[in-house]
Image (cartoon, rainbow, N blue to C red):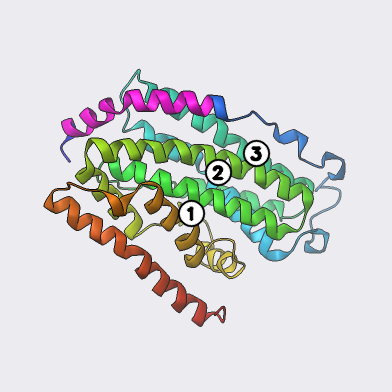
Amino acid sequence: MAHNEHFELVEALEPTVAQLLAEHRERRKAWYFHEFIPWEEGRSFVKEPWEESQATINERARTSLVLNLLTEDNLPYYHLVLERHLPEGSVWKEWNNLWTAEEAQHAIAIRAYLLTSRNCDPVELEDDRMATMQHGYEPDFGHIAELFAYTSAQELATRVSHRNTGKITEDETAFELMRNIATDENHHFMFYRGVMQAMLELNPTVALEGIYRTLKNFQMPGTGIPGFLRRSIEIAKAGVYNLRVHHDHVLMPLLRQWGIASLENLDAKASELQDKIMALPGEVLAKAERFEARFGMA
């Protein structure tokens, strides 16, 4: 997609973004993480070094919370990715700043819970944060449609992961905290989903190409996290996030809500992309079945 076409599409979407931003401000209720943290349980790690026996939730829940936290820690890179594609002085910038401010609370909240409740090794957590942020996150999006197709899928996937993580902790405090974070992610998902819906109406060929490129090889932005493969397999086996969850709670809802199957009057390229996108669920399910068979989850 040519540079000029990129900015023409971004500018054409500004009225939609202004409306979606207003709806987001109206819909989202402010919440405060300090009201969810059991501060009274906090103890000095200097006087009482951490031991795994002090943990109060199961190991898979701890792994999932840490993995979710380290993903949230990379927020400055996600902000920068958006910033590079947005025009100066536009409503897009207002959204990016607001989104960043709301997302920042998630990492603060999860870290406060983990440290206060002693459900992580504080030294390992800090070392992993440093390694993750030094690795950074530099995706190579082909065009703006791919960027916002990705943020749509990523926010929905994060909502699912946070909510499922809260469930497997079997801890009321963690559950309520992750429920609030997941609700935030849902609000963000609704914004990005709306952007892509408008893009499908303005330029269906470009939008479908972005959707296909994103969903064909979708990955959460965590590959720079130390031990990411091991940790991701662990939470996949726990049912927090795996290929079947991705199929049922991310891929299928996106295709349905964007109305991909029912799009009409498309040009030849767009029709081909439509067919390719509608074939993706079957491919993901096949991969899910192979994963489940390999790890005895069938």
Estimate the spatial distance between the alpha carbons at disc 3 and disc 1, rounded to whole Å: 18 Å
Crowd around label 1: few <14 · some 14–19 · many ≥20 (10 Å):
some
The type of residue carrying mark 1 is Gly
Q: Amino acid at mark 3?
A: Ile
Task: Say whether residue 154 is left or right of residue 122.
Answer: left
> In the picture, which quadrant includes the C terminus?
bottom right
Q: Answer yes or no: do the residues labelled 1 and 2 have beta carbons within 8 Å? A: no
Instruction: Determine which quarter of the picture holds residue 184.
Output: top right
| Residue 112 spot, x, y in % from top left | 72, 42
Disc 1 element: loop
**Which residue does the numbered mark 2 point to in the structure image?**
73
Kind of element beneath mark 2: helix
| Contact? badges 3 and 2 (CB < 8 Å) | no
**Which is more toward the observer, 61 or 54?**
61
User: Label 2 crowding class (10 Å Cα cut-off): few <14, some 14-19, many 20+?
Assistant: many
- Viewer-nearest residue: 261 or 118: 261
Residue picked out by circle 3? 108
Earlier along the polypeptide chain: callout 3 or callout 2?
2
